[in-house]
Image (cartoon, rainbow, N blue to C red):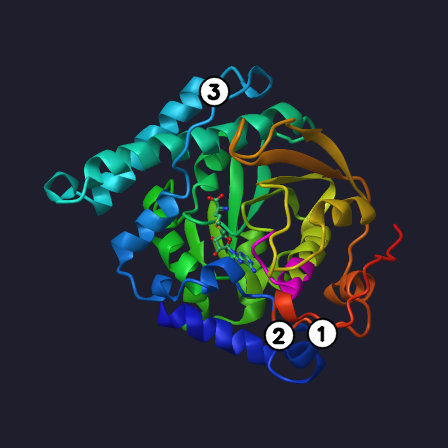
């Protein structure tokens, strides 16, 4: 994982996050506020880290009829099989473990497969303008499991965007394991390790269609071409980042998504205290996105999370600075963390 940390440190220096206004006032955008509260994440061994991400799904909520597609069972079975293979690869000893590892794995595989199949079906049902071959950017990929339905059901080139070195390290295992062919997985940190130029990295990332899975640290998102992405997904991530993080992700989302492209969100639909206070659903409306579907459910009562999807109706893109000016104001100080924010202007001024 050291190479990922080094890549982050280089980017912090190169992009000017270590000094001046951006550092002292806003803070850098590559923090996982929830994850960074768990320093043990940085000390656990590989297989235990994998479990952490696999087990982010551990509850089952029935799939409502309005979400079901004709290939629902097929996709769910595919997920179960792929996740089971992945677990056999990493936990061949599961039955020997004195903890109930084997039965726990079964639960996590089942719940994870269910949750991701629900994501797929919701997208399939509601993103009616998606074509047969798309570019899909997933923000904050966790295990990386959006890639499975994306490659199989949406015939995509899949971009996994990640800011946490620990998460990135886990995704390396998963994404390499599920890569559909030798040489179909591109890891931008590896390119940097071999001193490939940023220009060449960008060409490889955007123009070489032999890659089906592109692993991109969030600090390299500027390398993704404008208007090149058809679908963005962000599940259980947008309310776990800092002020700077949400502005960075939203500004690049507005830049890389093509007009008519979709932005799918699934999370509690609530802001969490101590992270940031920018209502990202409203922000999307203000920068020209229109909600096309939302499942009418209560989080963790009827369903896990609240799925909703927006369509980008404009050609406009907004820079980090523009969004910062509109949603924070000139004088806000957010660098010290969500509970010590100063001079925040509450009323966003942005007009589309
Ligand atoms: C709760 S997990 C959700 C994982 C996955 N989206 C899912 O639904 O299974 C949050 C994920 O977002 C990533 N993340 C956190 N902060 C981020 C940021 N500022 N930029 C990009 N990704 C971030 C975390 O590292 C982790 O992979």
Crowdedness near tag 2: few (<14), some (14–19) or many (≥20) residues, C-alpha within 10 Å = some
* Left or right of 66 in this view: 98: left
* Magenta residue check for 37: no
Residue 124, how many percent across, how many down?
59, 26
Residue situated in front as seen by the camera: 2 or 348: 348
Crowdedness near tag 1: few (<14), some (14–19) or many (≥20) residues, C-alpha within 10 Å = many
Whether pointer 1 and pointer 2 mark residues with C-beta atoms closer than 8 Å, the reply is: yes
Q: Mark 3: is the Cβ under 8 angstroms from ligand 1?
A: no
Distance between mark 3 and mark 2 Cα atoms: 45 Å
Say which residue label 3 marks: 72
- Mark 3 / mark 2, whichever is N-terminal: 3
Discs 3/1, front = 1
Residue situated in front as seen by the camera: 238 or 140: 238
Residue situated in front as seen by the camera: 16 or 38: 38
Residue situated in front as seen by the camera: 188 or 45: 45
Distance between mark 1 and mark 2 Cα atoms: 7 Å
Q: Secondary structure at mark 2?
A: loop
Residue 221, how many percent across, how many down?
60, 60
Residue 225, how many percent across, how many down?
65, 56
Residue 257, how many percent across, how many down?
69, 47
Give the residues in magenta.
239-247
Say which residue label 2 marks: 336
Say which residue label 1 marks: 333
Distance between mark 3 and mark 1 Cα atoms: 47 Å
């Amino acid at each position: 994982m050291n190479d990922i940390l080094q890549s982050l440190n280089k980017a912090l220096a190169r992009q000017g996050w270590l000094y001046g206004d951006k550092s002292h006032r806003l803070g850098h955008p590559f923090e996982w506020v929830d994850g960074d509260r768990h320093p043990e994440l940085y000390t656990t061994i590989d297989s235990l880290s994998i479990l952490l991400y696999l087990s982010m799904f551990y509850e089952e909520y029935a799939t409502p009829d309005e979400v079901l597609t004709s290939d629902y069972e097929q996709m769910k079975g595919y997920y179960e099989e792929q996740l089971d293979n992945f677990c056999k690869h990493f936990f061949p000893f599961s039955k020997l473990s004195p903890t109930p590892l084997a039965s726990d794995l079964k639960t996590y595989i089942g719940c994870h497969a269910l949750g991701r199949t629900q994501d797929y079906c919701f997208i399939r049902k509601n993103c009616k303008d998606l074509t047969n071959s798309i570019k899909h950017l997933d923000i904050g990929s966790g295990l990386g499991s959006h890639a499975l339905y994306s490659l199989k059901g949406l015939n995509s080139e899949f971009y996994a965007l990640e800011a946490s070195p620990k998460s990135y390290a886990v995704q390396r295992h998963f994404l390499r394991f599920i890569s559909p062919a030798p040489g179909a997985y591109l890891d931008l940190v590896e390119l940097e390790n071999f001193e490939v130029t940023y220009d060449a990295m960008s060409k490889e990332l955007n123009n070489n269609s032999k890659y089906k899975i592109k692993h991109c640290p969030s600090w390299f998102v500027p390398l993704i071409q404008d208007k090149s992405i058809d679908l963005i997904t962000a599940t259980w991530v947008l309310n776990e980042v800092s002020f700077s993080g949400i502005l960075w992700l939203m500004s690049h989302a507005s830049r890389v998504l093509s007009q008519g492209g979709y932005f799918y969100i699934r999370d509690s639909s609530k802001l969490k205290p101590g992270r940031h206070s920018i209502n990202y659903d409203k922000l999307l409306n203000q920068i020209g996105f229109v909600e096309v579907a939302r499942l009418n459910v209560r989080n963790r009562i009827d369903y896990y999370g609240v799925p909703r999807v927006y369509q980008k109706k404009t050609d406009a893109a907004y820079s980090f600075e523009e969004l910062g000016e509109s949603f924070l104001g000139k004088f806000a100080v957010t660098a010290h963390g969500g509970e010590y924010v100063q001079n925040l202007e509450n009323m966003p001024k942005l007009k589309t």
